[in-house]
Image (cartoon, rainbow, N blue to C red):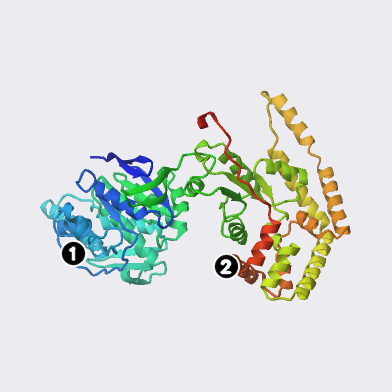
Amino acid sequence: MPIDETVSVDTPSGSIAISIESGASVVFIGANGAGKTRLGVHLERRFANGAVETHRIAAHRSLLLNPNVVPPNLEIAQNRLWFGRDDDQRRHKEISRWNQKPETVLLNDFDHVLSALYAENNDVSVAFRAQAVADPGNPLTPPVAKIDKLKEIWERVLPHRQIVILGSNIKTKTADGTEYSASDMSDGERVIFYLIAQALLAKSNTLLIFDEPELHINKSILAKLWDEIESARADCAFLYITHDVEFAGSRQAATKYALRSYRKEPTEAWDIEIVPENAEIPDEVVATIIGSRRPVLFVEGEGSSLDSSLYRRVYNDFTVIPVGSCQQVIHTVNSFAARSELHRVGCAGLVDRDGRSSKEAANLEGKGVYCLPVSEVENLLLLPKVFLALAMTLQFSDEDAQSRLGALRTFVLTQANQQIDAICIRYTKRRIDTAMKLIGLTSNDPAALDTEFKAAVAAIDAPTIFREAKSALNAAIIAQDYEKVLRCYDNKGLLAEAARQLDYQQKALEQFIGRALRSNENTKLHAALTDVLPIVKPRPGDKTDDDD
């Protein structure tokens, strides 16, 4: 029968109901030490009486693949895989499959997986042969064994590889026809094989619990793999336990829960909160927010760059989440503030200066979005306080550091003067783009709408924007106002010149800065960055009727 169960999990403030249904999936997201594996064990035990068949795949699992195993009969092979013993006494499963240590034991069942695949393939083949012998005149379509389905899915996920199925052996073939033993597969190839097989071999209407389903798998194929597995076992319920919010976000239809902590005494309890569905903030971002007890700082970028490391070091009281562009930061802060279920934590945003005036920066700050003192985040490292602190961290003398800063200042001012028109054109384009996005059209008939639109566009005066920007930047250059020029000069390449002045290649300098920021010893650099970056105050959520 299809699964349709609700299981309660104790929390410090009561219990939370988790719905388990065939064809549906549930994701628990939590950091290391939050009790994720213990929760998986707990749920497996709750169904130990057989009310719902469960099959849990531990994160701590052996990937040793021996393609030369000799299978017993199918019933014994399946029992060994599901229960760790030759019979189907599921009440002994925790002893025989988990060695009485279900949270920590190394799951070593790859041989059982292969034995069950081989045994099922043998049974299917023998039955087909018997049917063909009994009715030789009847053309038959060969049946599909589970190992055949596994091969199809594996090759769709890894299109440049093939699985070659022999009588009681498996090989792998590359695109150029080279064959190698399945035991020589990469970790990724083996774990994909293993996970597909575990799902295909499960009984009908089983709750499949996968702990760390992302382990050893390239992120570029992770979502496709689990889409394929879920599609192949639509009769089963899937429960994932992970710390990877990107993977959690890929399970778009899943019910998601953030798991923050675990308490063993006086009774087992987990601090769990559901991740609400919302079209404005991505699921994986909401999961990160809920999983944290700190206020959230939304920043520009993708999360893998130097600026993210810098922000996490300086704003260490915040959970820093990169969300893309400047407009996306502003939009996400506004969306967050409108979410009553997230009001227990505050939020703020941090964006590049992009030539904004003091009035414009103050307006954004009123909405909880703060501006950097430079046009590009990389150019924070060119500010005098930060550059000198970095030079001292690199063991330059004070006199030498000042000299190198002077050379850098001259270079930047000269470059800005030479490129002033290009800088101001880029600024003008950004202002036009922002203004176009802010046009609010209210007319209800085509003619009025056309008139309203044309009037709004006509109000965007590109020549005036350019002229005012050039005048301001030119005045800063003439006044040798280095910091004001950096506020307007949108050139990420200036960091390469700063690196050159410090006798470094840019990449090597970025790596050094990353290490320095992670260290607690380089307090001068940390202090300088803290001094030049804005003081960020979390914005509370907007009050709604639901908050009363």
The residue closer to the viewer here, 155 or 510, is 510
The residue closer to the viewer here, 309 or 346, is 346
- Work out whether residue 120 can be spotted: no
Rendered residue at 67%/23% (across/down): 445
Circles 1, 2 touching at the beta carbon (< 8 Å): no
Separation of residues labelled 1 and 2 (CA atoms): 54 Å
- In terms of secondary structure, where does tag 1 sit? loop
The residue closer to the viewer here, 263 or 461, is 263
Tell me where residue 352 appears, x and y as whole percent.
Answer: 69, 52
- Work out whether residue 548 can be spotted: yes
Q: Give the side of residue 121 with respect to residue 171, left or right.
A: left
Tell me where residue 545 appears, x and y as whole percent.
Answer: 53, 28
Above or below for 143 versus 508: above
Identify which amino acid the numbered label 2 is placed on. Ser
Rendered residue at 53%/39% (across/down): 343
Identify which amino acid the numbered label 1 is placed on. Pro
Furthest-front residue in this view: 266
The quarter holding residue 377 reads bottom right
Above or below for 190 versus 541: below
Mark 1 lies on residue: 71
- In terms of secondary structure, where does tag 2 sit? loop
Tag on residue 519? 2
* On-image quarter of the N terminus: top left
Check disc 2: other Cα within 10 Å, few if <14, some if 14-19, many if 20+: few
Above or below for 129 versus 269: below
Check disc 1: other Cα within 10 Å, few if <14, some if 14-19, many if 20+: many
Q: Give the side of residue 18 with respect to residue 319, left or right.
A: left
